[in-house]
Structures are given as C-alpha cells and as structure tokens.
Amino acid sequence: MDLFDKALDATMKMLSVNSVQSAPCDESPFGEGVAKCLHFVKDEAEKRGFRTLYGDGYYVWAEIGEGDLFGILGHVDTVPFEGKWDANPLGEIKDGRIYGRGVLDDKGPMVCCMYAAFQLLEEGYKPSCRLRFIFGGNEETGWKCIERYMQKEEKPVTGFSPDGDFPVINCERGVAQILVTFKKPQSLISLDGGVRANIVIDDASAVIEGEGSEVESDNLTAKAKDGKTYIKATGRPAHGSTPDKGDNALWHILKYAAKEFGGEYETLASQICDWTGEGLGIAASDYSGALTCNAGIAKVNGDNLEITLDIRHPNTVARAEVEKGLAKAAGVKSVQTQHFHDPHFVDEKEPLIQGLLGAYNAVTGTDDKPFSIGGATYARALEHGVAFGPMFPWQESTIHQKNEYATIEDFRKMYDVYLEALKRTVFTKR
C-alpha cells in the first residue's frame, strides 16, 4: 500500500501551522504553534501503534520495535516567513509545487520518513531494531529541544537526520555564532539589519551624520536631509551556511558608506563584505571545506557597533582559533561566542552510510558519494549520525528563503528514497 498521498496530506496539515518560535504557553516553551505540531506527530504515530512521549513541549519521540535504538531526528519549528511569497507560506500546492515554510526544513522530510515507516509496517516488514523518531521544537533558535532530549532520554546508537542534502552528509564543519563588538564610527547614528545570525540579511537601514550622495537603485536608497544621510538597503536571504547564495543588504550599506564617507567605513566594508572571512583574518580551509562567514545581525548599541557573525569553520580549525583571529581584527572591542557546534565526521565505510547511500543511488540511478557541508544538523547529536536529504543536487535551494518549495515530483522521489533507505537500514521482511 502506497502511503505517499497520506504523507503529502499530513505535510500540508503541518505546514498550515505557524511554528516559528513564539511566546511560551502551557504546552511548550516555544509557543502554541510548536506545541500543536508536536501533538500532531505524536497523535499520528500513536494511531499506528507507536509508543510515544511528549517531552514537556521541547520534543516528542515515537518508537516501535525492540533492541538497539536507531534514531531519525528532525524538527517542527521553522524560521520566519521573510519576504513576499508567490504562494501561501502556510502551505499551498500551485503549478506542480508544494509551497510552505518547512516543506523542506524540516516538516516535510520528517513526515515522509514517518509515513515511509508506516507503509513498510503495512507491507509486512518489521523493525530489526528499535526505531525512534525524535521531533524537536527549537532547532532554528538554539537546539534547547535536542539538548534537553539528550539530558533526559536514551541516546540512539546510530541514525540520521533528514535535514540536509542528498546523497549523504558524513562531515559537518564547526559552527560558531559570535557577537563581535566594533568601535562605532563616530558619524554612524544608527544601523539595523537582520533577525537571525544564520540568515543572510535581506533588509537593513542606517542613518549617518553628514550628507552623502543621493542614490535610488534596486538595492539601495540614500536620501540626504538636514545634515544627515538616511539609507535603506535590500538583499536576498539565504541560509547562513551558504552566504554566497544570498545578497547581504548590510554589504550594500557598508559599501555605500565606505565610498561616501571613507575612513572607518572603508575598514568595516573590507572586513564584513566578504563571506570567506579573509577580511577579518580568519580564512581557512581543509578536507571538510572552506570557512564561511555570514553577517546575520547588525545594530548600533551606544558607542558600539554589534555584528553577529555565523561562522562555519573547517574541522581542523578550533573554534578558539577563530575567536582569537577575530579579536585581533581592526576596531574589534570584544568577541563573545553565543552558540556553537563542534565539527562532526563519520567514516563513509560505516554500514549506516553504505545503506543510505545505496538506497539513494538505487532510487535515483546515480553513483554519488558522501560529502561535507557547513550546515548544522541534528546528526551532530549522535556519534554515528549523518544528515540524509531532503535536498537533491538538482533542486533550487529555497530553505530559509521566501517561496520555500519542493516540486511534487521531487517530493515523491524524496519519499521513495526514505522508503528504500528504511528497508535497507531498519526493517526486515516478516
């Protein structure tokens, strides 16, 4: 029995719930939307005979089978609905596409994995181990959900997170979100841009003492009035791990200020308007890839200019080295790491990777190999965990951007890959 249509229907129900973190409620510290989604997946699993636990609104787990614990880890919370969408961000099927915040990150993939397991059970397969789905409610804003899970619950021996890319991600670079406090240029009255460190800034504004040239362009507007220059800039958001795929609005402001006012603005522009980290003296590279640096939040605070950087550093570069490098940069007053994940690596010869990779290649007719990313997935919570999908190499990446979508064709293929992967790694025929 093919349960793809039911998986799609369940995904649309999940998408219809706004689960951006909000004010705490009785059911969850992350808000009503998160609580509603956690209850939904719990109820769906219970209907199929899974044992479940509601973890105080931080997480839900649902398991079936006996023996060693195999985990599938994902999340129900999302980033905000930034920008003007071409379809309903709370779920809409239009022109062969499934639109909605979370259709790829991470509601859709987790629902597909769960329904793939439901289908195998109906087809007469049985788990060869204990399969546990772990749904977190705070992945996008701090990982408090998975941290609490690991403190209170059993840790899976192995598993995967459908919250990355296909074919298999066996290496994740280190992540550090660092608040860097710069000496504020004297003429900078205000600067404001960004909502999350891990999103490329798509809207920013500033006011500078002194009258610069007036500009009216697609990305920047500058107006001079009463001895001040009022600047507004727009860009294109992207995931903080791939800043090169976005267009940072802060860069437009700093480049304008550098041209019109020179001095400290030139230094700031050379430091910040560079996603490799070279401008700040922290560029590095190794087998896991090159360091990336995203300026995700910027604001004036008294005499300081505070910029929160989302840095993805190579596996052989310690976070302390990055912090020391930033502290030496011109104009830097202090460096404070607010959130971090250490690097993660699993050898591609491991049976888990061979099983997942074999399933992917069988369904897609390819011969792809594991690879490394700068993103941070729940796979890091496991010693032998990897990220597995949902993004195919040919897909347009709209995660953390407006118009997040998957074509129905790709969504179907994703479901088929997870179905085959579970056959090879978790289930056996009765």
Image (spheres, rainbow, N blue to C red):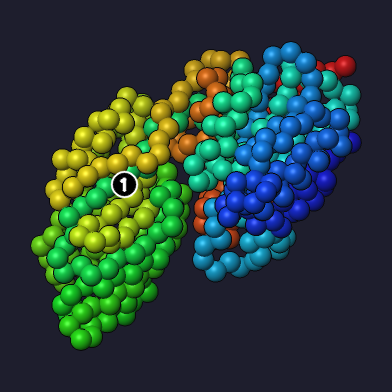
**Foreground pick, 176 / 303:** 303
Residue 130, percent across and down?
Answer: 74, 19
Q: Quadrant of the C terminus?
A: top right
**Foreground pick, 136 / 427:** 136
Residue 124, percent across and down?
Answer: 89, 24
Name above or below for residue 193 compared with residue 26.
below
Q: Which residue is mark 1?
A: 179
At 20% from the left and 60% from the top, the residue drawn is: 303
Residue 307, percent across and down?
Answer: 30, 53
Outermost residue toward the bottom in this view = 226
At 55% from the left and 19% from the top, the residue drawn is: 384
Name above or below for residue 245 compared with residue 282.
below
**Foreground pick, 371 / 304:** 304
Residue 418, percent across and down?
Answer: 70, 33
Residue 416 in sight from this viewpoint: no
Q: Is residue 363 left or right of residue 138?
A: right
At 66% from the left and 38% from the top, the residue drawn is: 56
Element at label 1: strand
At 46% from the left and 38% from the top, the residue drawn is: 375
